[in-house]
Amino acid sequence: MAENGQPVGEYIAVKALENGVTVTGVTRGAENKFLHTEKLEEGEVWIAQFTEHISAMKIRGRARVITAHGEIESGKN
């Protein structure tokens, strides 16, 4: 949350389409650093928010990523 209580960034949902999907949050700033990694099993859903600290997310494995801007599938079919 920002100081005014409003959400800082958009939410995304990641649905694992196979076991072992990883979602990693990357920090913003002069150096990008991996902040948090979550491992998902097939069918699990992870809902995450971009914040003043997280500016990017790396997704490894087959997953469906759902955002306000549309959907994309990661990994090989």
Image (spheres, helix red, strand yellow):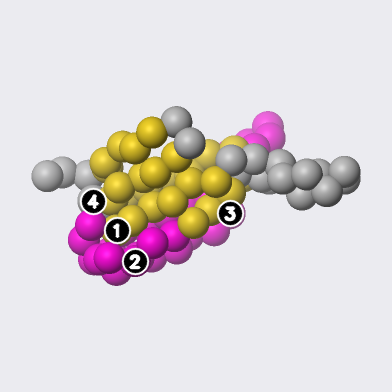
Task: Estimate how packed mark 1 is, as few (under 14), some (14 to 19) or many (20 or more) residues with alpha carbons within 10 Å.
Answer: many
Q: Which residue is label 2 attached to?
A: 44
Q: Quadrant of residue 22?
A: bottom left
Q: Amino acid at mark 3?
A: Leu
| Lower sequence index among marks 3 and 2 | 3
Q: Nearer the viewer, mark 2 or mark 4?
A: 2
Magenta highlight on residue 58: no
Residue on which the image places disc 1: 16
**Circle 4 Cα neighbour tier, 10 Å, few/some/many (<14 / 14–19 / ≥20):** many
Q: Identify which amino acid the numbered label 1 is placed on.
A: Ala
Badges 2 and 1: C-beta atoms under 8 Å apart?
Answer: yes
- Nearer-N-terminus badge (2/4): 2
> Where does the image place residue 37, in percent across and percent down from the top left?
48, 59
Helix, strand or loop at mark 4: loop
Name the side, left or right, on which 74 lies relative to 48: left
Q: Earlier in the sequence, mark 2 or mark 1?
A: 1
- State the residue position of label 3: 35
Is residue 8 visible to us here? yes
